[in-house]
Image (tube, helix red, strand yellow):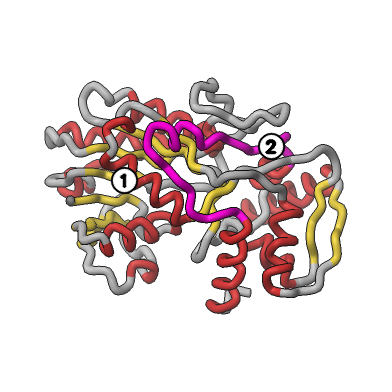
Amino acid sequence: MHFLITGANGFLGSALSHHLFRAGHTVRCLVRHGSDVESLKGLETHFFEGDVTKPDTLKRAVEGMNCVFHLAGVRRGATRDDFMAVNAVGTQNVCDALVSVNSRARFVLCGSLAATGPSFENRPRVEDDSPAPQEWYGESKAEAERIAFSYASRMPVTCARPARILGPGDKENLTFFKLVKKGVVLKLLGPPRPLSLIDVDDTVQLMTLLATHPAALGEAFFAAADGTLDVQHLMQLAADTLHWPTRTVPVPAPLLKSVGFVADLVTRATGKKLPVNRKLVRQLLAPGWTCSNEKAKRLLGFKPAWSLEDSIARSAKWYVEQGWL
């Protein structure tokens, strides 16, 4: 099959590109001018220079494809428009490009658990829940999903909603591992705040199922491993894997909010995107971020291969091997 991947040089995009290449498929990667493509090194892929916010760069890229994986997006921004311009309008631009060339390629959107909002009362989110995003990123991903499914009468559409993704190459969770390296395990004070997570390879497994499975059409699916944990548990597992001594540091919510506020001020003043920000703080202090993987199991035969413990362990070891820790 012939696949186009937007955002192919990102964490999930590069993992998906490697998987499809190893499986013998033709992989076309849409990357912006000047992008770092080191993560795609060694792949016989076809690079197309383009930008999902620039419609005139997309038509040639989507032509002749059997499936388009739309992964391009931003996770950090200073304003709501920063998120909407890429995550929502960018989705519409790719869909418009497919329609303009009369393509019947399957459109697989990489959405997010953030689009539905946090979970409450120890009940994981399920796909039938109404979206209730709590911040700009989540709003933009919810709007991207709404836009994608509005094209369902003109082309085949489906969507994955990954929980927080772990694995080799991940930078989003690296901050937690760096703190462990410094001997610190954070304990957020207050009620339990459970998290769903998923290994990058299991996310790739679900994405490839969405690309071909007939039951995927017109549907959205959460991507999560079995079980949940919290930030303290995640960090302690990393410490145990690497045999690093740590101390538990209790963190009250007001302190964490202050750190996020100051970090955003620094970002606005310098343009430097810090690993901590108010978006991350709001996510950490939510009642929970959990979702059910039962729909994907039932309809698609999805079977997570990585436990959370094993995924955290291999992430920690990879960071050390690569010199990231």
Q: Which residue is mark 2?
A: 288
49 or 18: which is nearer to us?
18
- Going by the image, does 233 lie left or right of 23? right
| Residue 93 appearing in the image | yes
Residue at image mark 1: 69
Give the percent coordinates (x, y) of residue 121. Answer: 72, 27
Taking 1 as reference, is 262 left or right? Answer: right
SS label for mark 2: loop
Q: Main secondary structure of the magenta part?
A: loop
Q: Which residues are magenta?
A: 285-308
Above or below: residue 314 compared with residue 274? below
Residue 35 image position (x, y, % from top left) = 36, 63
Which amino acid, by three-letter code, is at mark 1?
Phe
For label 1, the crowd category at 10 Å Cα-Cα, with few meaning under 14, some 14 to 19 and many 20 or more, is many
Q: Is residue 157 magenta?
A: no
Instruction: Identify the secondary structure beneath mark 1.
Output: strand
Q: Nearer the viewer, residue 45 or 230?
A: 230
At a point 31% along the width and 30% down the height, the residue shown is: 215
Which dot marks residue 304? none
